[in-house]
Image (cartoon, rainbow, N blue to C red):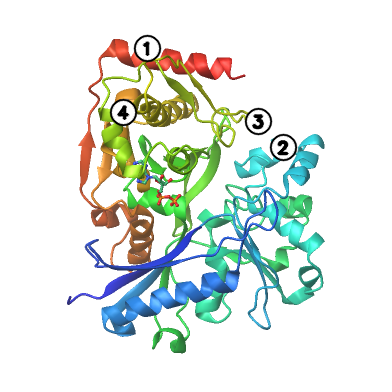
């Protein structure tokens, strides 16, 4: 390799990874370490921030060595699980408590109290987000209220999301976040350059503890020389779902990406238009470069790949997730079986946290394959409903690009094209999150003048074209809609 490589650090929820990319977008190497999940009580999910740092550093060191030394790295891009909060001491650089992970529900009552006090419309209008424990602000407040070390840290307190924590450790004390991550804290106005004083006061978060908000591509300092054998510039920062949208080359309105993992996250860019959802989608910052902010609309489905895990681990119906493709193909249709996959309530656009799952249409003729097929079909049904909400908010998709572990399933990809009546594209390399961070770092390092030019780093894709007969599609969607109504 003659050209210098881009090193991406991807601090995810269940693992931390590092990847090396050539400037043309070829992925050269990958390192991965699992991350411990702590479940101290029902509804609570925590990480050890020191472990996130240690694993990230291990992965980075491995790839710097594979690249041939720090001089072979042109820039680092960081992408991360969003919303997760870390509190640390500026003097020691040590975490003051475990990180509270995005999935953690411990602040549900705090959110309910704010809603009852009539604050939701204000918060939604200013941040694009609904009042939910998912976001960072109430998690920060919880730490201040409940953890003495955080409450007593005073001026030494640093609060941030995971990219801030990593940047601090890598640079030895630079306290910055990027606009995409900041837009998930509920403390920044969608169109505000810095932290919003009214929001910080409402949630009770001290502005002085928060990082400065910057672009997604630019100069974020260099790594301490000892860490990687020499200083390496950090040039890109972004939250994982925004990075995946960029990595898919979804940069203008009409494009949409769906990451099909444990859950499904769908984003569509809106350009410079401020997102205003009337259908409980989330408004978010896609990225900011040169101070110019691009926005996106986002919808999440809580149960996607986790439904396949449930079929495997709880029902014992399948041995491996990948087997579901052949099982679905082994029957000509669903045999009248439909599934409402509300194993963890229903997310966007229905937002029915208390809904439970159901399977209908069972007869003596129903076999395992029908149930598996009904489960797979329920993924496309949910995405279809989200497509409707995006369209109703004026952000209709023209095509959909998929990624994530579940997107490997050809049957699901085709079914999604059929149900959406829309072309579905799947890149050959579905690691779009890391690729997006690499694109941002490439722009930040001056390898490309802008993201549109960096889009040549995206990988070629396979295409799934709608093929289902119209009456079968209508029948499917009608029966799904009935199931949703019955489930109320
Ligand atoms: P996450 O990033 O949320 O941990 P991944 O993107 O790694 O998730 O995707 C893993 C999920 O995808 C699992 O829930 C698994 O059940 C599902 N999955 C993986 N491969 C397939 C497949 N071939 N068909 C259907 N589902 C799959």
- The 10 Å Cα crowd at callout 1, few under 14, some 14 to 19, many 20 or more, is few
Name the residue that disc number 2 marks.
Answer: 120
Residue toward you, 30 or 325: 325
Looking at the rendering, which quadrant does residue 141 occupy?
bottom right
User: How far apart are the two marked residues, 1 and 2, measured between alpha carbons?
Assistant: 38 Å
Query: From the viewer's perspective, is 136 left or right of 224?
Result: right
Where disc 2 sits, the SS reads: helix
Residue 306, given in percent of the width and then of the height, sits at 47, 42
Please identify the quadrant where the N terminus is shown. bottom left
User: Does label 4 or label 2 sit earlier along the sequence?
Assistant: 2
> Disc number at residue 415?
4
Name the residue that disc number 3 marks.
Answer: 354
User: How far apart are the two marked residues, 4 and 2, measured between alpha carbons?
Assistant: 37 Å
Query: From the viewer's perspective, is 119 left or right of 339?
Result: right
Where disc 4 sits, the SS reads: helix
User: Does label 1 or label 2 sit earlier along the sequence?
Assistant: 2
Hey, which residue is sitting farthest front in the picture?
364
Where disc 3 sits, the SS reads: loop
Q: What residue sits 27% from the left and 78% below the top?
A: 67
User: How far apart are the two marked residues, 1 and 3, measured between alpha carbons?
Assistant: 27 Å
Name the residue that disc number 1 marks.
Answer: 475
Whether label 1 touches label 3, CB < 8 Å:
no
Query: From the viewer's perspective, is 39 left or right of 178?
Result: right
Residue 298, given in percent of the width and then of the height, sits at 49, 40
Whether label 1 touches label 2, CB < 8 Å:
no
Q: Vertical placement of 245 versus 448: above or below?
A: above
């Amino acid at each position: 390799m003659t050209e210098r490589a881009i090193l991406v650090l991807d601090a995810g929820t269940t693992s931390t990874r590092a990847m090396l990319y050539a400037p043309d977008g070829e992925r050269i190497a990958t390192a991965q370490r699992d991350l411990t999940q702590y479940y101290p009580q029902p509804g609570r999910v925590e990480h050890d921030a020191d472990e996130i740092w240690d694993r990230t550093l291990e992965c980075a060191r491995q790839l710097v060595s594979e690249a041939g030394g720090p001089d072979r790295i042109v820039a680092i891009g960081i992408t991360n699980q969003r919303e997760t909060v870390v509190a640390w001491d500026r003097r020691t650089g040590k975490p003051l408590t475990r990180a509270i992970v995005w999935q953690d529900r411990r602040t549900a009552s705090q959110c309910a109290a704010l809603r009852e006090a009539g604050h939701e419309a204000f918060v939604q209008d200013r941040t694009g987000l609904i009042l939910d424990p998912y976001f960072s602000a109430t998690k920060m407040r919880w730490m201040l209220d409940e953890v003495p070390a955080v409450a007593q840290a005073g001026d030494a307190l640093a609060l941030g999301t995971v990219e801030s924590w990593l940047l601090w450790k890598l640079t030895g004390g630079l306290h910055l976040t990027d606009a995409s991550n900041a837009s998930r804290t509920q403390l920044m106005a969608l169109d505000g350059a810095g932290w919003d004083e009214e929001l910080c006061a409402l949630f009770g978060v001290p502005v002085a503890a928060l990082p400065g908000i910057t672009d997604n591509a630019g100069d974020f300092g260099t790594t301490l020389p000892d860490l990687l054998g020499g200083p390496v510039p950090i040039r890109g920062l972004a939250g994982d779902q925004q990075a995946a949208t960029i990595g898919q080359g979804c940069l203008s309105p009409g494009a949409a990406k769906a990451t099909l993992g444990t859950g499904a996250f769908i984003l569509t860019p809106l350009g410079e238009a401020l997102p205003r959802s009337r259908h409980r989608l989330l408004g978010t910052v896609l990225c900011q470069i040169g101070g110019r902010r691009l926005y996106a609309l986002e919808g999440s489905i809580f149960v996607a790949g986790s439904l396949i895990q449930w079929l495997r681990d709880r029902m014992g119906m399948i041995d491996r997730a990948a087997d579901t493709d052949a099982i679905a193909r082994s029957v000509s249709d669903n045999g009248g079986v439909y599934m409402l996959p509300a194993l963890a309530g229903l997310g966007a656009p229905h937002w029915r946290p208390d809904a439970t799952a159901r399977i209908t249409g069972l007869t003596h003729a129903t076999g395992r394959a029908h149930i598996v097929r009904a489960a797979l079909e329920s993924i496309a049904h949910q995405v279809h409903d989200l497509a409707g909400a995006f369209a109703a908010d004026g952000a209709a998709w023209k095509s959909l690009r998929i990624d994530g572990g579940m997107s490997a399933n050809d049957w699901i990809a085709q079914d999604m094209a059929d149900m959406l009546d829309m072309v579905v594209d799947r890149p050959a390399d579905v690691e779009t999150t890391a690729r997006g961070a690499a694109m941002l770092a490439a722009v930040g390092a001056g390898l490309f003048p802008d993201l549109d030019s960096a889009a040549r780093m995206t990988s070629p894709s396979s295409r799934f074209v709608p093929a289902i007969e119209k009456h079968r599609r209508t029948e499917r969607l009608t029966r799904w809609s009935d199931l949703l109504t019955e489930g109320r």
